Amino acid sequence: MILRALEMKDKEAAFQAHADLALDNFSFLLDSFDENEPWSNFIERVNSVKRGEDLPEGKVPATFLVAEVDGQIIGRVSIRHRLNDYLLERGGHIGYGIRREYRRRGFATEILRRSLEIAYELGIESALVTCDDLNLASSRVIEKCGGILENVVELENGEKLRRYWVATKPQS
């Protein structure tokens, strides 16, 4: 598995992954995605966010990467370089998703492990990673990567969110 930036050749596969994960109410291409926007513009916007340029209000610099196995995009990760109030409460430093057909194969754990290494390179010593309280698979992934549960918070809509802190320094 490799983690890499989006490329022009990824348009159709990324659109399919976006549609697949929409079934789980998860935005593969992030909330800023507009299917009517030229693909090259979207990629440039993702790169601008990584550089911290032209950030929309309420957004922070973030690295967006796709996970690829045997030439197939199987998932994605967004690594936020810092937290704002919203991310501190809900989103955390790292958000990842795996397409349904690739789940239960260890890819989520591998994506999170590699993302923690990238976070460490960005100067983040401890990353906040969150998941829905009922998402036992994600809870197991986070705990397998060393996540320590800080708390479970109830959101305005009544849903509960698990908040974990994970050390980013690679284990020797």
Image (spheres, grey):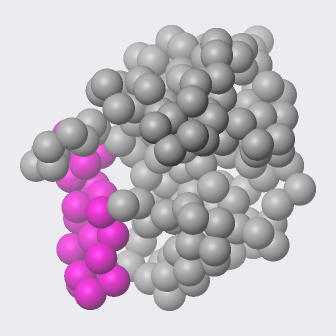
Residue 37, given in percent of the width and then of the height, sits at: 23, 82
Q: Where the N terminus falls, by quadrant?
A: bottom right
The residue at 49%/82% (across/down) is: 15
Q: Where the C terminus falls, by quadrant?
A: top right
Q: Which residues are magenta?
A: 32-52
Residue 139 appears left or right of 105:
left
* Residue 163 among those drawn in magenta: no
Q: Quadrant of residue 88?
A: top left
Residue 59, given in percent of the width and then of the height, sits at: 24, 41
Residue 143, given in percent of the width and then of the height, sits at: 79, 25
The residue at 61%/33% (across/down) is: 161
- The outermost residue toward the right is 104
Say if residue 138 shows up in the picture: yes
| Main SS category, magenta section | helix
Q: Nearer the viewer, residue 120 or 100?
A: 100
The residue at 10%/49% (across/down) is: 54
Please give the count of numbered marks on the rendered protein. Answer: 0
In this view, 4 is above or below 92: below
Q: Quadrant of residue 117?
A: top right
Residue 126, given in percent of the width and then of the height, sits at: 54, 14
